[in-house]
Image: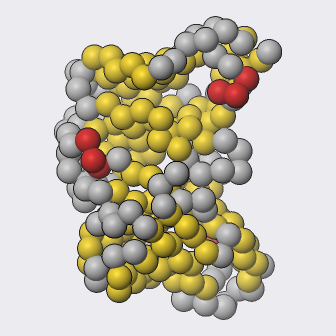
Amino acid sequence: DAGITQSPRHKVTETGTPVTLRCHQTENHRYMYWYRQDPGHGLRLIHYSYGVKDTDKGEVSDGYSVSRSKTEDFLLTLESATSSQTSVYFCAISESPGQGIGNNEQFFGPGTRLTVL
Amino acid sequence: QKEVEQNSGPLSVPEGAIASLNCTYSDRVSQSFFWYRQYSGKSPELIMSIYSNGDKEDGRFTAQLNKASQYVSLLIRDSQPSDSATYLCAVNLGTGGKLIFGQGTELSVKP
């Protein structure tokens, strides 16, 4: 398995509380991604990072922020959690996003199951 | 129109048969295509990537790409019950390496 860990693996929280999810990699890959997976919607990109302190929005970024202060860590923060953010969150890493290049494959972490009551 | 479409299934095949999974995509500039396998409650696992038209084989898996028709498929030969999972098709749109995923096809291999 690619060296990707996510913490916590499970979390239950209440509406309005802040939540931070952590993704940690030991592969020294430049690119990191946060996805959420919901029934009926599949996997959707929230935010991604293309280097330390370099991040950009994905398809469903509203209500989420990210930070990357070190190559190995990518944090996802829900500033004020809502019930619609109940989901399974996956982190992924990639060596390079280049088109037609073999090293743009993404590898996923084990996921975090978040429940917002 | 969804950018990546897959039949949701479930697709049921007998053990030993060939399972055929299909995916169509809408963006003609896409050049990188991936198949992931996801067991229930687990994370997606990359099983095949394909970049050029034609077939790519890896063990019991064959990925087929036809850019002119904008479809990519995955064949699983000699299907086993352990192949029962959801198979996700993903397409790289070329903007920051972002992948767009289909909703997945659930495959059930019956002993």
Residue at 59% x, 51% y: name it. B43
Left or right: residue A39 versus residue B49 is: right
Residue at 76% x, 78% y: name it. A12
Position of residue B71 measured from the top left corner of the image (x, y, whole percent): 35, 25
Q: Does any portion of residue A96 appear in the rendered image?
A: yes
Q: Does any portion of residue A63 appear in the rendered image?
A: no
Residue at 60% x, 59% y: name it. A110
Left or right: residue A10 versus residue A92 is: right
Residue at the top extreme, as displayed:
B17
Position of residue A117 measured from the top left corner of the image (x, y, whole percent): 77, 79
Left or right: residue A5 versus residue B27 is: right
Position of residue A22 measured from the top left corner of the image (x, y, whole percent): 53, 77
Asked where in the image residue B8 lies, by quadrant, the reply is top right
Position of residue A54 measured from the top left corner of the image (x, y, whole percent): 26, 78
Rendered view: A75 above or below B8: below
Rendered view: B16 above or below B37: above
The quadrant of the rendering that contains the N terminus of chain B is: top left
Rendered view: B109 above or below B40: above
